[in-house]
Each structure stands twice: as C-alpha cells, then as structure tokens.
C-alpha cells in the first residue's frame, strides 16, 4: 500500500495555469476520488502523480519519497485508462500478464497471477480472446485485471467507466468497490460523475478551475458542503437554490424567499444564523428534503414547515416522483413519494424539512 501526499502542486502549459497550488493527502489503503467538471484539472493531477505529466512546481510524495523526477515505471503504480489501452494483437491472457513480463517475472509467476486475476474478475472464459472480440464491459474488466495482476502499491483510475452504458457503469462500479474492499490497495479515481464519487470514495476531493473546493467523506460533502458550488455539484437532482432574506423577530428567525412564504429556522440553528439577520442570503434545500408523506412525529423531528408548491412538470420514476414547480419567484425540484402526476398549475402541499437546510452568502457562495 501507499501513502500519498500532494504538496502545493502547480501545472502550467506556457502561460496557461491549469492547477493552482493543490494540497491533499491519501492514507494507506484509502480510496480517494478526484471529482469536478470538465477542465477542472483532475486528470492533469492524476497524470502528474503517474509521471505522465511533468510538475511545474510542488511535490508528489509516495511513501515519503518525492517522485517528481522518477519515471512512471519506477513508481510502482498501475493505471486504468478511459479507453482501456489494451494491446489489440494480444489475447486477454497476454494482456493480463504483459506488465509482469516486462518486469521479468517467471512464466510460473505470470501464469499464477493471470489465473488468480481472471478468477477474481470472472473472465477465465475470455483468456483466449482478443480485445476486438470483447464487449465494452469485458474490455474494462481486462484493463482493471492487467493493473491488479501487477500487485502495485497504488492504483490510478482515469474515468474508467465513461465509455460504458448506464447499466454497465453500475455493474462495473460495484465490481471496482468489491475489488478495493478485497485488496485494500491505495487508489485514486478521477471522474466527473458525482454518483461514482459518492458510491466509491472513502474521501472525495472536489475541484474547480484547478483549485480544491472541499475535501471530505461523501457524507461531509452531502450534509456539510463548504460552499454553493460543492452543494450544487454533489447530489442528483442538484440542490435547489432560492434567493431569500434572513429576518429576526424576537427569538424567532425566518427565511423569506423572494415572493414566497416565510420559513422558520429551527431553534437549534437560530444561534448560528442570528449574526446574519437582515442580510440577503441563498437558501439551499435538496429535492429529497421536500416530502408529501409524514407523521406528526416525523414532522416535529425534522422541523418541517408546510409549503405550497405550484406544479409545472411531474416526472414519475416508479418508486418516487420528481415535481418541478415554483414557490414564489423560485423554481425548485422536489423528490416525493410516488404520486399520480398532478396537472400543470396544481398546488401541492409539501413539507419542507428545515433541519436539512443550508444557507450561503449571496455573493461568495460560502456556507454560513
């Protein structure tokens, strides 16, 4: 296993700065996901860790050794690419064993590693085939198997599921999770898909424009986002953002959406938000924090506030329904228990669970 430190990492292409002083640390056996929109620098950072890109300044440290100037073959890493990168003229067996062959492993060692890897990934029946005779999911399993067979100290994954259809993505995501639980090898995984990040990661590094916005567990990012960008990037459908004003009246604090009904702030949060009373703020509520079924006990426990939502579009999803609608001047989406699609313009009485709310500064987007 490997302990990885990235210290004040910068990357420039000519005058273009693409990574701006990135710092993070990955513990032994940890599965860390770098996530962010296209162009945020996540793949560039991964390639610098792999040695496929030079470092402009800063240090990459693996097991207390600075590897900036060490060639990729000497870093004891294995990388899985988006495009599989299999040798088309070689069989699956030869692809799986190629890395070991290049390290001058014996035929017995190679055969044992290939057998063990094929059993783990359930691709034993494919060993005689060429990559052109495999499906996308089978090719990706072979690409992952080639990395596993080498038994490296560090796995690097560069958007490995991007070329697969939705069903295969879910299957391979589960396969990667099982493999990590079995081998416990330190892994760094790059994706733009927040669902992959949330389901796979021990910790997530959220990037934007070459800078880190937040580092934390999936629960940290979902429940305690540091700013509006993270709050909007994590979660599907995305968090609702509503322009509002924070108003104090005696011991009570209210959130007043523009043109909408006032919503009471739970008592346990009044002390935290009172210093911001009188300010324009942004209220953040996730779609699942609006519900259409509740008991008196659940309503009280969640500080739920009744709220009328004017329906624009309803999207039935089977187990639940997405309601796209409006409160005041704000457009919102709510994930509610499955209902018959209400007509456009209908008013639904929902409960807004205010103990799950988030408040952000209007200008900077920083969480209050």
Image: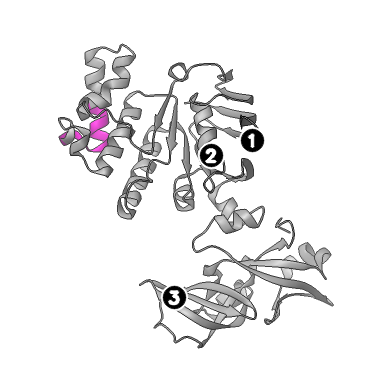
**Tag in front: 2 or 3:** 2
In this rendering, the count of numbered labels is 3
Looking at the magenta stretch, what is its main secondary structure?
A: helix
Q: Is residue 214 left or right of residue 124?
A: right
Element marked by disc 1: strand
Distance between the Cα atoms at labels 1 and 3?
A: 47 Å
Which residue is label 3 attached to? 337
Which residue is label 1 attached to? 17
Name the mark on residue 42: 2
Instruction: From this view, report whether residue 66 is shown above or below residue 48.
Output: above
| Residue 266 visible to an observer of this rendering | no
Which of marks 3 and 2 precedes in the sequence? 2
Residue ranking furthest to the front: 14
Element marked by disc 3: strand
**Mark 2 crowdedness (10 Å alpha carbons): few <14, some 14-19, many ≥20:** many
For the point 33% across and 32% down, the residue is 85
Q: Is residue 327 left or right of residue 362?
A: left
Q: Is residue 102 left or right of residue 361?
A: left
For the point 26% across and 16% down, the residue is 109
Distance between the Cα atoms at labels 2 and 3?
A: 37 Å
Expressed as whole percent of the image width and height from the top left, the position of residue 106 reads 26, 12
| Residue 289 visible to an observer of this rendering | yes
Which of marks 2 and 1 precedes in the sequence? 1
Q: Does the magenta-highlighted stretch encompass residue 120? A: yes
Q: Give the extent of the magenta segment.
A: 115-125
**Mark 3 crowdedness (10 Å alpha carbons): few <14, some 14-19, many ≥20:** some
Image quadrant in which the C terminus is located: bottom right
Circles 2 and 3, Cβ within 8 Å, touching? The answer is: no
């Amino acid at each position: 296993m490997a302990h990885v430190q990235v210290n004040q990492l910068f990357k420039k292409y000519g005058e273009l700065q693409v990574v701006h002083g990135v710092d993070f640390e990955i513990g032994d056996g940890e599965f860390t996901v770098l996530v962010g929109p296209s162009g945020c620098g996540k793949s560039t950072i991964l390639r610098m860790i792999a040695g496929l890109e030079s470092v402009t300044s800063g240090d990459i440290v693996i097991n207390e050794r600075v590897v900036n100037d060490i060639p990729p073959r000497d870093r004891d890493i294995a990388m899985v690419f988006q495009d599989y990168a299999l040798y088309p003229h070689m069989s699956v067996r030869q692809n799986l064993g190629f890395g070991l062959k290049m390290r001058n492993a014996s035929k017995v060692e190679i055969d044992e590693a290939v057998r063990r890897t094929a059993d783990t990934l359930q691709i034993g029946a494919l060993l005689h085939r060429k990559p052109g005779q495999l499906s996308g999911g089978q090719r990706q399993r072979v690409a992952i198997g080639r990395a596993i067979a080498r038994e490296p100290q560090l796995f690097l994954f560069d958007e490995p599921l991007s070329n697969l259809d939705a069903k295969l993505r879910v299957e391979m995501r589960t396969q990667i999770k099982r493999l990590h639980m079995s081998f416990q090898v330190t892994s760094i995984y790059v994706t733009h898909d927040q669902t992959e990040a949330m389901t796979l990661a021990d910790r997530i590094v959220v990037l934007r424009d070459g800078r880190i916005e937040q580092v934390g567990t999936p629960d940290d990012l979902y429940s305690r986002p540091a700013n509006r960008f993270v709050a909007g990037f994590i979660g599907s459908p995305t968090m609702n953002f509503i322009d509002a004003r924070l108003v104090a009246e005696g011991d009570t604090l209210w959130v007043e959406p523009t043109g909408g009904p006032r919503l009471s702030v739970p008592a346990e949060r009044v002390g935290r938000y009172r210093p911001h009373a009188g300010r324009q703020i942004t209220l953040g509520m996730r779609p699942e924090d609006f519900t259409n079924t509740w008991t008196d006990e659940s309503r009280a426990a969640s500080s739920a506030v009744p709220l009328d939502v004017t329906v624009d579009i309803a999207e039935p999803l089977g187990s639940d329904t997405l309601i796209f609608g409006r409160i005041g001047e704000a457009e919102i989406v709510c994930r509610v228990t499955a209902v018959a699609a209400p007509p456009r313009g209908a008013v639904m009485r929902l409960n807004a669970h205010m103990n799950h709310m988030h408040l952000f500064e209007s200008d900077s987007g920083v969480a209050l």
